[in-house]
Image (spheres, rainbow, N blue to C red):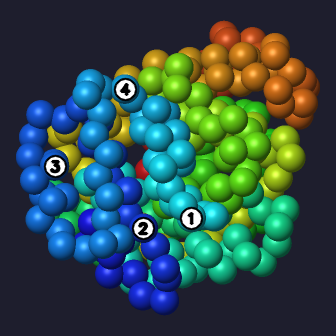
Amino acid sequence: MESVLGQEGVALELIVVDDGSTDNTAEIVASYQDARVRLLQNKQQMGIGYCHNIGLRESRSPLIAHVDADDFLLAGALRKMIEALQGDAQIGQAHCYFFDVDEQGRTTGEEFGKRWVQFRRNRPPTLDYKAKLAQGANVTNALRTYRRAVLEELGGFNERLRFGIDYDMALRLLEHYTIKLVPEFLYCRRLHRSNTTESLRFKTLRFWVQMYRIRRQLAQTQKVGFLASAHLDLYRFIRGQVLNTCDRVSQQ
């Protein structure tokens, strides 16, 4: 919250969605005596898609940015996201590079260097998002920032999905709009044992299958035309992902 409220040169509102938590989230939010902060509380856990949508409905801003509760922004992050979206009305989503930190918010030069090399190789500004997403790669990085009108046009986020919500949205968005990368490290992702993304990485096969199911459903319902030519053979897809992972491991 402090990293968001500390952003300069940006008129913002911070909507915190408490998804049926059992900790002291509400008390922490209430401790911020700032008119820009609003707390929404779900009576029971509803999932990420629902939380994104209720935030969208309650928001008054033309731009929407998502920050996970355990992560934080670097100075100037939101200003640069806004500038990226203001440059072209055809851009429906902007995102940036991120690096991982530990529970105390620390990282090492070695770990940061590895992330920099990875993004330089796999996330260039000229990336073909349609091709990569159609292959099952979720290449829309952290601090995903959207035009509100685009999200409303697309009917919001898919609340039936337990995870992969941002991947599903990126595919649907690319049918009519483009995605722009701000190639700067503006977001810190905190890693710890309760981190949802990290826990899913231990279930890599499950993650791949979910990405495949999302693509297949969108292709079958003809909601995303560019997926019509995508390979939707599950065995072939999983085999390809396993081989790619083995190649990456052997190069390390």
Type of amino acid at the residue the image marks with label 3:
Ala
* Residue to which mark 4 is pinned: 46
Could you give the CA–CA distance between mark 2 and mark 3, rounded to whole angstroms? 17 Å
For label 3, the residue is 26
The image quarter in which residue 31 lies: bottom left
Name the residue at 52% across, 26% down.
159
The earlier-in-sequence mark between 4 and 2 is: 2
State which tag comes first along the sequence, 4 or 1.
4
Asked if disc 2 and disc 3 are in contact, CB closer than 8 Å, the reply is no
In contact (CB < 8 Å): disc 4 and disc 2: no
Q: Is residue 141 left or right of residue 192?
A: right
Q: Are marks 4 and 1 in contact (CB under 8 Å)?
A: no
Disc 4/disc 1 C-alpha distance (Å)? 23 Å
Mark number displayed over residue 109? none
According to the picture, the residue beneath numbered tag 1 turns out to be 61
Task: Provide the secondary structure element on which disc 3 rests.
Answer: helix
Residue 3 screen position, x and y as percent:
30, 73
- Residue 55 in picture, x, y percent from top left: 46, 47
Contact? badges 3 and 1 (CB < 8 Å): no
Q: CA distance from mark 1 to mark 2?
A: 8 Å
> In the figure, residue 133 lies in which quadrant?
top right
Q: Amino acid under label 1? A: Ser
Residue 13, disc: 2
